[in-house]
Amino acid sequence: MVDICLLGTGGMMPLPKRWVTSLMVRYNGSGLLIDCGEGTQIALREKGWSFKPVDTILLTHFHADHIAGLPGFLLTMGNADRTDPVTVVGPKGTTRIMQGVRTLAPELPFEIRVIEIGAAEETFHLNGMTITAFRVNHNITCYGYEIAISRGGRFDVDKAKANGIPLRFWSPLQKGQTIEFEGRVLTPDMVLGSARKGLKIVYTTDTRPTASITRHAENADLFICEGMYGEPGSEAKARDHKHMTMQEAAGIAAKAKPARMWLTHYSPSLVKPELYMDSVRAIFPEVLAARDGQDITLTFSDEE
C-alpha cells in the first residue's frame, strides 16, 4: 500500500490556513517528497508524519513557493540524527540550487545526491518506485512526475514444478533473484504467474495543459493537478502566467480517465476553491478540491 498526503496546497505564498506546495508519498519504508515550499516541515508536523523516511525529494522547478522550505526541512532532518543519503531530483540547475542550500545548511550529517533531468522525459528507479519526469509548459523549465509501483505475479507452485525448479530456489526466485544451477539459468518468470496491476500516482503543477500530462495521467490511481484559478473569466490570466484553471485541469482528467483527481496549488485569491467545484465536476465527476493535509492510502487491487 501507498500513503499520500498533500502537505501544502497553496501557490505563490502561504496563507494563515494554507501552506504552499508539497506532497509526501510513503511506500515500503521509504518517503518521497515532491517540492518543499515554505512551511513544509510545519505541515508535516501538523500531520503527525515523520521526517525519518524521507530519502528522495523531487523538484518540479525553481520558483520559491516550491523550494524555499528546503534549508529548514533538511536542517530538521539533520537534527534528527539522519546519516543516510538523500537523493534530490530536479531540472538542470538542481546541483547549483543544492549548493546554495548547503551554504545555508553547511553541517548536514548526510550526503545529498543530485540527479539532474536533461531530456523532455526521463525515468529513474528509486526505492522500489519507477519515477518518470515529464516536461510541462511553465514560464521556466518545469516537470511533472509519474510514480509507478509495479506488482509481480503470484508464486505458481505448478509452474515451478513443471519447470523442474528445486524447492530451495523457490523463495529466492520469488524475490526476483536469477540463479545459475547445473548449466541452467533460473529466472523469476519460471515460478511466477502474470504480473498484477500496480499503482500509479501523477503529480503536476505550474503549467498549461499539455499532451504529456494527459498521456501520463491516463488510468492513474490518483491524478494531482494544479487548479490555480476557478472563477469565471480567469482563462486569460491562466494563459498569461502559464498556469491552469480548475476547469482546464478537469478537461485533462476527462481525457485521461484517472480513478480520482485532486486539485491543488490554488492562487492566494482563491480562498474557497470548493465554490467552483460544480462546474469542475460537470467536466470530471471524480475530483476533489484538496486541502492541506488531504491524504489517502492506495492499495493494490488484490489487497482490497
Image (cartoon, rainbow, N blue to C red):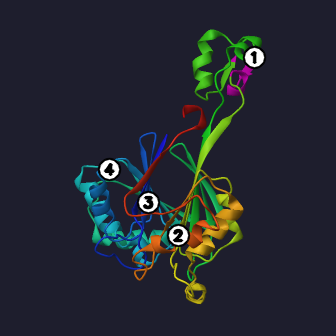
Q: Residue 11's image quarter?
A: bottom left
Distance of label 4 from label 2 (alpha carbons): 29 Å
Distance of label 1 from label 4 (alpha carbons): 50 Å
Distance of label 2 from label 3 (alpha carbons): 22 Å
Circle 1/circle 3 CB separation < 8 Å: no
Q: Is residue 141 above or below residue 255?
A: below
Q: Is residue 90 above or below residue 87?
A: below
Magenta stretch: includes residue 158: no
For the residue marked with disc 3, what is the amino acid?
Leu
Residue corresponding to mark 1? 183
Q: Earlier in the sequence, mark 4 or mark 2?
A: 4
For the residue marked with disc 4, what is the amino acid?
Trp
Query: As drawn, is 17 to the left or to the right of 186?
Result: left
The structure residue drawn at horizontal position 41% and vertical position 51%, both measured from the top left corner, is 55
Q: Earlier in the sequence, mark 1 or mark 4?
A: 4
Mark 2 surroundings within 10 Å by alpha-carbon count, few (fewer than 14), some (14 through 19), many (20 or more)? some
**Which range of residues does the magenta coloring cover?**
181-191
Residue corresponding to mark 2? 277
Q: Quadrant of the C terminus?
A: top right
Query: As drawn, is 166 to the left or to the right of 50?
Result: right
Q: Residue 13's image quarter?
A: bottom left
Q: Earlier in the sequence, mark 2 or mark 3?
A: 3
Distance of label 1 from label 3 (alpha carbons): 49 Å
Residue corresponding to mark 4? 49
Q: Nearer the viewer, residue 28 or 246?
A: 246
The structure residue drawn at horizontal position 63% and vertical position 23%, both measured from the top left corner, is 173
Circle 4/circle 2 CB separation < 8 Å: no
Q: Where does the image place residue 185, in percent across and percent down from the top left?
A: 73, 22
Q: Earlier in the sequence, mark 2 or mark 1?
A: 1
Residue corresponding to mark 3? 23
Q: Nearer the viewer, residue 107 or 280?
A: 280
For the residue marked with disc 1, what is the amino acid?
Gly
